[in-house]
Amino acid sequence: SLELFRSLNSIRDAMINLQFIGRSAIQMGDYQTSIDSYNENLTLSRFLQGKSEEAHALHDLGIIYHLLADQQKALDYYE
């Protein structure tokens, strides 16, 4: 059970790092890297059934698509 605990903590650490990468990429205008980071974060959030983390990832993806002027895709993520 300690091994499982460490494994879950590693996943959570990866999610935090992916959020930082996503935010940094947005600030640098590298939207594709940001999208990739948040999509990976979304996958991990769903794996852990972390509803709050999933909501943040979806929201951040919506922001990116809004910045890219893809309003329909942004709305899809906001819903």
Image: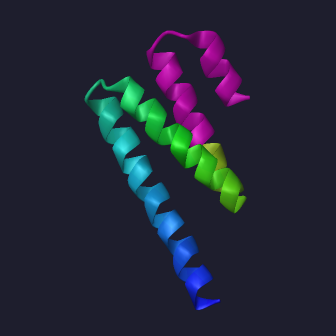
Provide residue 59's location: percent of width, then percent of height: 59, 36
Please tell me in which quadrant of the rendered image residue 75 appears.
top right
- The rendered magenta stretch, by its main secondary structure, is classed as helix
Q: For the magenta stretch, what is the residue range?
A: 57-79
Q: Residue at x 62, y 47 (%)?
A: 43
Say left or right for 35 vs 62: left
Q: Is residue 37 shown to the viewer in this render?
A: yes
Say left or right for 56 vs 22: right
Provide residue 57's location: percent of width, then percent of height: 57, 42
Say left or right for 16 vs 4: left
Q: Residue at x 37, y 40 (%)?
A: 23
- Name the image quarter holding the N terminus: bottom right
Say left or right for 48 vs 2: right
**Is residue 30 a member of the stretch shown in magenta?**
no
Q: Residue at x 53, y 44 (%)?
A: 40
**Is residue 77 a member of the stretch shown in magenta?**
yes
Provide residue 4's location: percent of width, then percent of height: 61, 80
Compared with 37, 68 (above or below) is: above
- Name the image quarter holding the C terminus: top right
**Residue projecting furthest to the front:** 3
Q: Residue at x 49, y 56 (%)?
A: 15
